[in-house]
Image (cartoon, coloured by chain):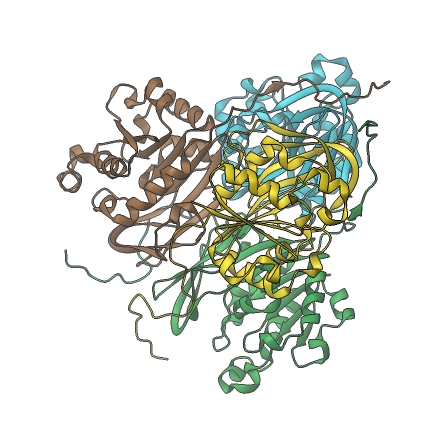
Chain colours: A yellow, B brown, C cyan, D green
Amino acid sequence: MINVTVWNENRHEQNNPVVREVYPEGIHGAISSFLQEEGYNTKTAILDEPEHGLTDAVLEETDVLIWWGHLAHNEVDDVVVKKVQKRVLDGMGLIVLHSGHFSKIFKTLMGTSCDLKWREADEKERLWVVAPSHPIVEGIGEYIELEKEEMYGENFDIPAPEELIFTSWFEGGEVFRSGCTYTRGNGKVFYFRPGHETYPTYYNKDIQRVIVNAVKWAQPVQRNLPVYGNAKPLEKIAVKVN
Amino acid sequence: MINVTVWNENRHEQNNPVVREVYPEGIHGAISSFLQEEGYNTKTAILDEPEHGLTDAVLEETDVLIWWGHLAHNEVDDVVVKKVQKRVLDGMGLIVLHSGHFSKIFKTLMGTSCDLKWREADEKERLWVVAPSHPIVEGIGEYIELEKEEMYGENFDIPAPEELIFTSWFEGGEVFRSGCTYTRGNGKVFYFRPGHETYPTYYNKDIQRVIVNAVKWAQPVQRNLPVYGNAKPLEKIAVKVN
Amino acid sequence: MINVTVWNENRHEQNNPVVREVYPEGIHGAISSFLQEEGYNTKTAILDEPEHGLTDAVLEETDVLIWWGHLAHNEVDDVVVKKVQKRVLDGMGLIVLHSGHFSKIFKTLMGTSCDLKWREADEKERLWVVAPSHPIVEGIGEYIELEKEEMYGENFDIPAPEELIFTSWFEGGEVFRSGCTYTRGNGKVFYFRPGHETYPTYYNKDIQRVIVNAVKWAQPVQRNLPVYGNAKPLEKIAVKVN
Amino acid sequence: MINVTVWNENRHEQNNPVVREVYPEGIHGAISSFLQEEGYNTKTAILDEPEHGLTDAVLEETDVLIWWGHLAHNEVDDVVVKKVQKRVLDGMGLIVLHSGHFSKIFKTLMGTSCDLKWREADEKERLWVVAPSHPIVEGIGEYIELEKEEMYGENFDIPAPEELIFTSWFEGGEVFRSGCTYTRGNGKVFYFRPGHETYPTYYNKDIQRVIVNAVKWAQPVQRNLPVYGNAKPLEKIAVKVN
């Protein structure tokens, strides 16, 4: 049983009736719902809860954390960011969605600005699979089509992905590396582009399937953590005369 | 249920009493045995069978193929090599062990000479994990120690691994990239160094665990194969006046 | 001084007046010309010459080989392919252009089918830079635009590029990994997509700049080749009692 | 002409007579000296200077920054760290040496703990080349041998290197990824392990050659920086009726 915590900023849902209509239970509610149907043990957490809902106990029990944020990245407490980073390095999986590219946690793990081009123009997005053997694309066709989405365009200021899974085509003339995996410490990170708050993207069956697959892929590997610091020699080192 | 075919050249076992004593059921028998205990559906195939035991029917039913060869790489029929390559590109996993680095199938998939340094001197090998988040090292400590093995040393003439999982230390002064993953087409490839025929390496519980994990990792992803060739436009292309 | 050999199949130029008009000196002539202007020492070679113009002497003197082929991949002698592969492994750079994706030498070095989608429909191509720190994009803007080109679309059946430099957007709805680097042995390989024979692509200043940069990047590193085979221990190995 | 700034903490040299004897001009002085002989335009900067010697003007003029620190990572001002990160993202090369693995700037760019095993026991280190085609190993043999060095051992908690150039063998039984490249934004990063303060490592001709090569490799690519933010469509997007 994989324990998933779905974190959402949950501000658009409060401020924007359009978003509330699309996601009456919040983006976290929508994502949590289809993950539960797949048999995952899910929990949600939002910005306005104490410690943003990410207490030590919650983080400790989380195998994979999903992150959606946009308006209020700066309101996320640096202490919580450090704790999440620590948990990723200790093995927790992290799936960063859409505008989460600019979250503190993603920028901290990447070391870059994570900046990009964007445009809100109801454009068609087509996410082409470029890693056909990857478990994240199980059950997915050659591409996923979204009739309307926000455009994100290159250059996307990220480290070269360890695995590039999807590349998006946009109607207006741009491309984007829209599915990217990284390893950080003992943990795995997946960035997945789609999911602008005004579109029903997280109800799309292919998008759901990718997130379901990504959770499975990102779950921690069971093994002892590495030991660091001053080490005894494993082999006999010849005595040296200086 | 994952279907594994364990292919072995099976010549050392015929020609060398030392090897026969270590592996009375052949290297293929030893590997097949611990894979069965893990619940995999296993089959074996050897060089001296018709079509080397790798008929179309066998290949078609194989999810993951394991390959051990050494003395007789040149006796492997090019037609069979082409078929195995095709199956890997279509999704079959391939695990190449030890002296299989010089097999036709591995060289064909890598595009390089796959040459290396070697020495038979009963040396200690220590395989250090350098990809702690990878499913192939689940249950494995910081390193695997083998009291005696053949040395393989750098330069190992392979393409840069997509993921480097293990790096070996040898008593005599060399290092070696001893666990390397690649993707080819819709299939996954794992090269794993240990397993010289005169040592009981494939009875080592850590080595077995790595191979068990690798089979799980290398199994095909369930999705339709990509379509190639002349394609209709997905979008309306503006008429152009030349 | 870098020695570049520009290899061209040179069949379209003979058979198709449109191509002859675009490239009166042949594609090899056009490429050779702008490389000379950059101060490289260039030579050309074509399919219909003895040994396809790639004698041992020519290969030995070549630092970087450029390859354009399309109609007659199968007419390229396997012996020449093996020699080119050997030279790449020994350090010669190789730049494969456009339909060269299906050449024997590229498929041999990649280990995959190198298949793709294609369409001839006078489409706009926009090659986006996704590796802004790479020397191959020196002097290049955020993208290169080609008013009309043949479309190549994903899935492109290649190993995951070691460095992905460009990704193409096409008017008809596809994307393509259009600038890819690999290392093979002591040599470097760059695949660069543009250059359909009926368009004046190789007169485009940005395309020329990329090829000029790629030649510089692909030149051999000056060092002794690695030594393979049976190796003496570098360290004293403890005597072991069996 | 490449402008190199060699930054050194310069504390061991003040506190430890052994180090002062090995590096009477400081580690920065020794490194600066051999870089000058190669024709680079060098400058030095140390922790105890105002702004650690890394003023806006200095950073702006620096093509490649070399970093050596150990005892006083925490004394490096976060404001300076941010500025250095910004300059790397804008194209400045960064070469991090030895105990600089734990510097704020390296950890910030990597996103991981950058922790490792270590031991001071006068061990032999042998750095094996595992990327024979890389310009950083030009003129270098199959390995570099250092008679005595501090041991650094795996697990090294870094993101998987984009290119792994060297792997070290240590007498006491460990291995280490000792030459690693990364790209971050428009800049390139090279981590190079050797150089414990009590050994004359930076006088070793091979070590000098690697650093000389790395500076050349890490120099900025000349092109305009990418533009981010709200973008106009490059193509005409069809009007959609909601």
In the displayed structure, would residue B228 be above or below residue D44? above
In the displayed structure, would residue C60 be above or below residue C118? below
Q: How many marks?
A: 0
Toward which corner of the image does residue C16 lie, by quadrant?
top right
Percent of width and height locating residue C79:
48, 25
Query: Looking at the image, which is closer to me, A239 or B194?
Result: B194
State the residue lying farthest toward the right.
Answer: B241
Left/right of residue D201 with respect to residue A24 in the rendered view: left
Toward which corner of the image does residue A172 lie, by quadrant?
top right
Toward which corner of the image does residue B46 lie, by quadrant?
top left
Q: Residue at x 20, y 44 (%)?
A: B198
Left/right of residue C24 with respect to residue C166 in the rendered view: right
Percent of width and height locating residue D13:
56, 82
Q: Residue at x 59, y 27 (%)?
A: A142
Where, quadrant-wise, is the C terminus of chain A in this rendering?
bottom left
Percent of width and height locating residue C82:
48, 29
Left/right of residue D96 with respect to residue B163 in the rendered view: right
In the displayed structure, would residue A222 be above or below residue C117? below
Where, quadrant-wise, is the N terminus of chain A in this rendering?
top left
**Residue C169 appears anywhere in the view:** yes
Query: Looking at the image, which is closer to me, B48 or C14?
Result: B48
Percent of width and height locating residue C238:
23, 62
Q: Residue at x 53, y 35 (%)?
A: C159
**Residue C66 appears anywhere in the view:** no
